[in-house]
Amino acid sequence: MINYACSKCRTAMASPDGAAGQVNKCPACGQGITVPPAAARKRRAAHRSLGKHLPATSTEGLLNFVGAIFAVLAFVSFIAGAVLLINDQFERGVILFFCGIALIGAAILYSAFRHVLLYLRTIANGGRGPAGE
């Protein structure tokens, strides 16, 4: 059996193995749906298996929180470095200033990682977004 979903209403449908390429009508909305070939099914199955090891959607709040922590730490490092530089504590001020730069670099890398993670989760959910909606 070939299992697939309506592209309009996402109703689950099934057809015999020899029906690939035929057009079937969705029982729920009446949309004409072409039965996918076996290669497309294997590709979707591979995308679904890719998504099994990715974190659940509930972790998106945690991802946003970690990104905010990077930004706050970078800001605090810059401010503390500036205060130390003003108070003639050059070495400590420079160290904190460069820590702020390093945190900004880490935040940029983290943001890139987060976007790649969300993109992979979208692919794993068949292009329907992180929550599979």
Image (cartoon, rainbow, N blue to C red):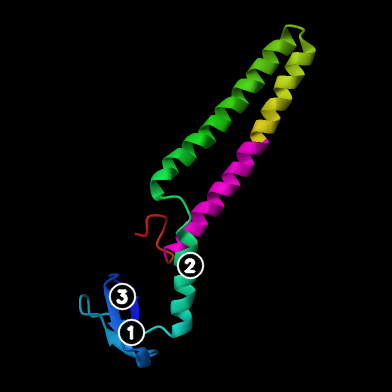
Lateral position of residue 63 relative to residue 81, left or right: left
Q: Which residue is mark 1?
A: 1
Tell me whether circle 3 and circle 1 mark residues in contact (CB < 8 Å): no
Q: Secondary structure at mark 1?
A: loop
Q: Is residue 6 magenta?
A: no
Q: Earlier in the sequence, mark 3 or mark 1?
A: 1
Q: CA distance from mark 3 to mark 1?
A: 16 Å
Residue at 39% x, 90% y is 21
Residue 47 is tagged as 2
Residue 74: x percent and y percent? 62, 27
Tell me which residue sits at (53%, 36%) in the image: 67
Query: Which region is colored magenta?
Result: 105-125
Question: Is 72 displayed left or right of 102 in the figure?
Answer: left
The numbered mark, 2 or 3, whose residue comes first in the sequence reads: 3
- Whether residue 107 is in magenta: the answer is yes
The mark lying in front, picked from 2 and 1, is: 1
Mark 1 belongs to which amino acid?
Met
Tell me the element at label 3: loop
Mark 2 packing: few (<14 Cα in 10 Å), some, or many (20+)? some
- The three-letter code of the residue at mark 3 reads Cys
Which quarter of the picture shows residue 72? top right
- Name which of mark 2 and mark 1 comes first in the sequence: 1
Q: What is the number of the mark on residue 6? A: 3
Q: Quadrant of residue 12?
A: bottom left
Q: Quadrant for the N terminus, please.
A: bottom left
